[in-house]
Image (tube, rainbow, N blue to C red):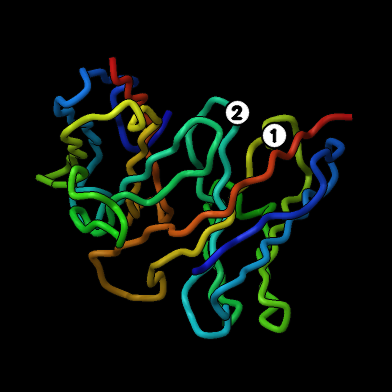
Amino acid sequence: QVQLQESGPGLVNPSETLSLTCGVSGYSISIGYYWGWIRQPPGKGLEWIGSIYNSGRTYYNPSLKSRVTISVDTSKNQFSLKLSSVTAADTAFYYCARNDADYSRAWGPWDTWFDPWGQGTLVTVSS
Amino acid sequence: QSVLTQPHSVSAAPGQKVTISCSGSSSNIGYNYVSWYQQLPGTAPKLLIYDNNKRPSGIPDRFSGSKSGTSATLGITGLQTGDEADYYCGSWDSSLITVVFGGGTKLSVL
C-alpha cells in the first residue's frame, strides 16, 4: 500500500522560501510514475503546483513556475518542493500525491490523476 | 475563478441519487480525460473516478462518471450521510499547459 507523508515547517516568513518534503513508503519512486504537489488555501479549491518524474523531469503550473522548484531523491524515496518569495497568498494546505500521467507525450488526449494523496500539511505565511 | 465550473452546492435525501456537473472547454474536458475527487471534512482529497468513468479499486459502484462534449458528470446513487463532502473535478488543459480543477461542490445529504 503506497503511503505519502508531507513534512516541513508550518510557519514561513513573508519573502522567504517554503520548503516541504514528501516521504513515500510502499512503493519505490525509482520504478516510475510522476509525483506531484497540490495546494489548497483554507476553505478554497485545489491548485496543482507541479509534478516530477523519477528522472528529475519536471512540469510546473505556469502561474507558479518562476517561484517553484520540485526535486526528487530516489535514494531516500522522497521528493521535495521549494516555493520562493512567499506571501500571505501562499498560505495553504500542501498535499503531495502520486500522479498518474504522461506529460512528455507529444499528442493527446492527455489523462492525469492523483492517487494516493498524503494527509496534507498547513503552511502559514506570516511574520 | 476556476477553469472548470462546478455548482457550489447540491443536496439530496439519503437513498436518493445526485449528479454533480463540471463544465469546461475544448482545451480541457472537450479533448482530455476527467478525474473526480472526494474530500471529506478535514481530510485529504481521495480519487473517485479517473479517465472519465473508471473507478479505482475499492470505490463502490454507487459512484459513476461520464463525459459529453465539454462537460463531465459525477453520479452518486444510494446516498449515505457519509457521502457528505466536497467533490472536485480535474483535467489537463492543453492550452494553459497545466492541470486544472473545478472550484468544488459541497454535497449535503439531508
Helix, strand or loop at mark 1: loop
Residue at far left of view: B68
A32 up-or-down from A36: above or below: below
The front one of B18 and A68 is B18
Closest to the observer, A52 or B57: B57
A67 up-or-down from B3: above or below: below
Q: Kindly indicate the quadrant of the structure image that contains residue B80.
A: top left
**What residue appears at the point 51 percent right and 49 percent down from the top-left corner?**
A48
Amino acid bearing label 1: Thr
The quarter of the picture where residue B10 lies is top left
Q: Secondary structure at mark 2?
A: loop
Q: Position of residue A17 (x, y in %)?
A: 81, 49
Quadrant where the C terminus of chain A lies?
A: top right
Q: Are marks 1 and 2 on the same chain?
A: yes
Q: CA distance from mark 1 to mark 2?
A: 8 Å
The answer to whether mark 1 and mark 2 are in CB contact below 8 A is yes
Q: Residue at x 37, y 44 (%)?
A: B37
Q: Residue at x 66, y 64 (%)?
A: A70
> Considering depth in this image, is A67 or A37 the residue closer to the camera?
A37
Judging from the image, mark 2 belongs to the subunit labelled A
- Find residue B3 and report its image quarter: top left
Q: Position of residue B24 (x, y in %)?
A: 25, 39
Placement of A57 over or under B10, stated as above or below? below
Residue assigned mark 1 = A91
Q: Tag 2: residue type?
A: Pro
Residue A94 lies, in percent from the top left, at 63, 46
Q: Where is B63 relative to B32, above or below?
A: above
